[in-house]
Image (tube, rainbow, N blue to C red):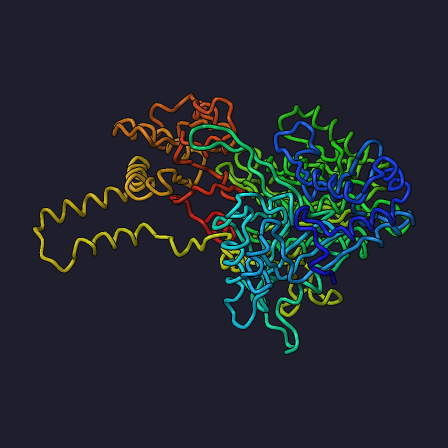
Amino acid sequence: MGKPENYNRELALYPEDLLGFVQETQDTQWQKFCSLYPNSPEQKFLERVASQLNKSDPNAANKELRTFGTLGVLRHELRDRGTRFSLCQFKPEHELNPETLARYQKNRCRVVPELVYSPWATAQQLAETGGKAKAWRIDLVLFVNGLPIATLELKSEFKQAVHNAIKQYKTTRLPVDPITKKPEPLLTFKRGALVHFAVSQYEVYMATRLEGANTTFLPFNKGTQDGGAGNDSPDDVDRYATDYLWNEVLVPENLLNILARFVHLQIEDKEDWEGRKYKKEALIFPRYHQWDVVKKLVSAARSEGTGHKYLIQHSAGSGKSNSIAWTAHQLSSLYDADGHKQFDSVIIVTDRTVLDDQLQDTIYQFEHVDGVVGRINNKEGDGSKSEKLAAALEKSQPIIIVTIQTFPHVLRAIENSVSLKERCYAIIADEAHSSQSGSTARQLKEVLMNEAADENEEEVTTEDILDATVASRRASKNVSYFAFTATPKTKTLELFGRCPNPNEAPSKTNLPAAYHVYSMRQAIEEGFILDVLKNYTNYKVAYNLALKIQGTDQEVESKKARVKLNQWVRLHDYNISQKVRIIVEHFKDNVMGLLGGQAKAMVVTSSRKEAVRYKLSFDKYIKEKGYQNIHALVAFSGEVEFSKNDPNVAGLLGEKFSENSMNPNLKGRDMRKAFDTDDYQVMLVANKYQTGFDQPKLCAMYVDKKLAGVECVQTL
């Protein structure tokens, strides 16, 4: 426990611990520093650290400079005129280096209560608050080696108390002093504490960037046993529902691990409404379920060894990309008791290219080296792709990313190579991406499922492919599977789930279940996804509502009534041009004005051929009506060609349609990024972008497809 008066408000440091750690663990360097600065070396060192804390440039060519501030100072050496200091020692991957382990054990983790943080509060202002400086006092601040890591505001008495703590952060814990307009170093983004917790005995929320009223707090709760948000009340009346925060998360070993292997700075390229480009920075601190699942998976892999399967059922809105990135990195650097790597390579199966860049940037912040992640993608020729895959496996590249189509070749390469089959692999399957369609789907289904595929069958899900690939092979003791999915099918549960009683055969009382769950209900209640069924309207219901609005109890002229009803019936006819008319007019009248005119919509069609017809009809209709500000993209895989047997083929025979040919104004842009601009308002899709697609401006979805089961949940 620290004393508030020992805190340096101007530098936002706890000098005793910072100097003590350096002097105790790096005496040679410290003596060298003292000889360079014989007058007040302690003060000079503190000022040098503070100047490094203030450094951070998201546009810097040097990657290290992009991520400085507190996180960068913790992870990178501090250099000054030939001296080099580490201000924190994270736990080594194995215990074969006793010197490093000894330094790790000398980290100083300190809690300081009732800390007055502002260097700008005058003596008069402090006196006016009764000597307690309530306006500038934080309940708890956590330090690691004198560097501020976390602040906590604690509230109690009633269930809404946590929201009072959030309000306090938003209104009085400001990153800039309201009087002097100078930054408060402890509360400044990146430069000060990395995370801020609002805590009551019932709930916990966190923020990594204080911005006054614009501050975003995320829930940091475990969830209830029945899948809801919040926390269960403990059976022990002497315990709080939130005691996991200090008994699990903030214990020194776990907090240091979070700082070393979870927290990272995410920098995204953005464009404002006038087309100006800028960098958006966000400091990522794991939510509880993310930290919990990664910790448990890594621990299980260490204790159980290879050859096991883990099913992670995390809803949309759970932050699966980060969970996968953290899991992949920590499994790739996992060592056994003898100092040998547990997995020669971690193989991620995904079609989300956004995960590539995210993994590269995130892991660089942990490792400080490039080339940890390699991708084998579809853009290369078959020969080049197979050669690159073989080379990556042969040299044991730590993390290899492959597509679902390449995944069977990975297993085949491992099985057929004498050298590779002796190695150990972790396979992380990310099922939050699009289905396979067209000839690719049919070929995969025939090869993997040993059954003929219907020529008209357009879709095979990635989950089907994964399940079939794994089921067709004998269990291998050198391959572990980690399957991430939001809504597992029965087959997936059978293949990857675990029975409560593993010694008994699966039965009604011993059904296989997911290893870890973050439920859809919790995601909805925590506000990460919407309960779309609250805003779902069947077209038949809309039709009846429209009649009621017109007043069905009133007597009307039969001829006019028939005309009105006829119009609705014609619009409801199974005809794409009429459905396009309904969609465009509904979008124009009810949707496009939302979000300051930036609202987007998606149309889900039942096949690639329907998507083509929709796009042709859509373009024709908006041209006829002269609408200047409604434009559509169409998304589907492969090429579409109409045959004589297809209905409504007039003018379409002999022409091949593809995404490129039907979206001429894309001009090489990524479709996701183009859809985010003002150039497009509607996206027409066929078995694409229905899962794993994040577009915050999407306000409406028009579903012209039969949806059932898992696909229905994922799409909506």
| Residue 336 x %, y % | 86, 50
Of the pair 356 and 19, the residue shown nearer to us:
19
> On the rendered image, what quadrant is the N terminus found in?
bottom right
Q: In percent of the image, x 38 and y 42: which residue is there? A: 595
All told, the count of numbered labels is 0
Q: Residue at the front extreme? A: 124
How far from the left and from the top, in percent, is residue 210? 55, 49
x, y (%) of residue 129? 55, 62
Is 32 positioned to the left or the right of 120 in the image?
Answer: right
User: In which quadrant of the rendered view does residue 235 lie?
Assistant: bottom right
Q: In this orientation, which residue lies closer to the viewer: 291 or 101? A: 101
Q: Does the rendering let one see residue 449?
A: no
Q: Is residue 174 above or below residue 611?
A: below
Picture coordinates of residue 589 (x, y %)? Answer: 28, 41
246 w.r.t. 528: above or below: below
Residue at position x 26%, y 27% from top? 626
Judge by depth and name the residue closer to the eye, 94 or 75.
75
**Could one spot residue 486 in this view of the protein?**
yes
Q: Is residue 700 left or right of residue 692?
A: left
Tell me if residue 8 comes above or below residue 78 in the rendering.
Answer: below
At 71% from the left and 34% from the top, the residue drawn is: 64
